[in-house]
């Protein structure tokens, strides 16, 4: 089933409609808010470079985010889907950031950790290569879109579920110390933007995971408002940074 043939293709002769403009606006807004999430780990990596050590930081969020970005980037390309190029742009930028973060981590990790992370990075590209091969060699276009679409939905839902650990920490400690407001707000706005983008395109594979992300974003913001007064000091860096 072809889920993502956008309505905006029907109005090429008459120029873009109001709905088309809203669709593009939502997609561009999603790209902007996602960029805020992509740069959020920069303080962590400045610390790694300054200290010459990865300390107790983990590379797993960046390894997983790289795979997520690659899958979603592939879904947005014309080889798989038509008319959702803004999904490709945001995830191409995201993949570049995650690859750069992983490279810095490898450069400053100890020998054992360097070997482990390098192996995981290689595994990510092998998995992505298999997905691309199966998509192009074994599946027709409509089946290919469904196959990659479900992979992207599963990947995004898992990614959006990762803040649940932070939500649990906030409830347990009654403090938003480890849940920075602007990071939570950016994730919420990004999810809302891509939810609207997916709805306007009638694309199940975009609006379902981002709808879930929107709900989780609302929960985080409500928790922030409720527990803000009981927090101690300034908001710290997030324990885990993820994106679309």
Image (cartoon, helix red, strand yellow):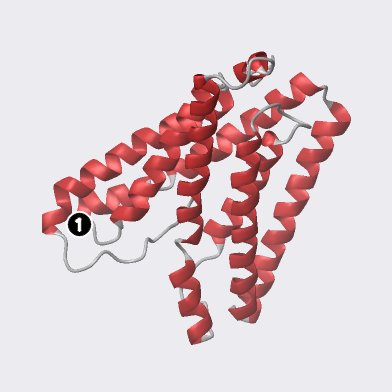
- Quarter of the image that includes the N terminus: top right
Q: Residue at x 67, y 27 (%)?
A: 83
Local packing at callout 1 (Cα closer than 10 Å; few below 14, some 14-19, many 20+) is few
Q: Residue at x 65, y 61 (%)?
A: 99
Q: Quadrant of residue 240?
A: bottom left
Residue lying at the far right of the rendered structure: 137
Q: Between residue 201 and residue 146, name the one nearer to us.
A: 201
Reading the image, the residue beneath label 1 is 173
- The picture places residue 202, in percent across and down from the top left corner, at 56, 18
Q: Quadrant of residue 75?
A: top right
Residue lying at the far left of the rendered structure: 229
Q: Is residue 19 above or below residue 232?
A: above
Element assignment for label 1: helix
Q: Residue at x 64, y 18 (%)?
A: 3
- The picture places residue 198, in percent across and down from the top left corner, at 53, 26
Left or right for 75, reference 154:
right
Visible residue check, residue 104: yes
Q: Residue at x 57, y 32 (%)?
A: 153
């Amino acid at each position: 089933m072809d889920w993502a043939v956008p309505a905006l293709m029907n109005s090429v002769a008459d120029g873009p409609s109001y709905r088309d403009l809203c669709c593009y606006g939502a997609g561009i807004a999603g790209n902007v808010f996602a960029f805020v999430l992509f740069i959020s780990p920069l303080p962590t990596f400045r610390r790694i470079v300054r200290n010459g050590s990865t300390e107790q930081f983990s590379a797993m969020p960046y390894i997983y985010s790289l795979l997520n970005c690659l899958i979603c980037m592939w879904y947005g390309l014309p080889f798989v889907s038509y008319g959702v190029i803004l999904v490709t742009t945001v995830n191409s930028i995201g993949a570049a950031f995650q690859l750069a973060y992983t490279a810095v981590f490898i450069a400053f990790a100890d020998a054992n950790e360097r070997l482990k992370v390098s192996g995981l990075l290689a595994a990510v590209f092998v998995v992505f290569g298999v997905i691309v091969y199966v998509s192009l060699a074994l599946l027709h276009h409509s089946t290919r879109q469904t196959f990659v679409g479900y992979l992207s939905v599963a990947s995004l839902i898992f990614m959006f579920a990762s803040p649940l650990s932070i939500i649990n920490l906030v409830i347990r400690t009654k403090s938003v110390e480890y849940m920075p407001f602007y990071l939570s707000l950016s994730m919420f706005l990004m999810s809302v933007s891509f939810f609207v983008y997916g709805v306007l395109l009638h694309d199940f594979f975009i609006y379902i995971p981002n709808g879930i992300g929107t709900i989780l974003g609302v929960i985080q913001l409500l928790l922030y408002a409720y527990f803000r007064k009981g927090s101690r000091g300034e908001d710290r860096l997030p324990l885990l940074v993820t994106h679309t």
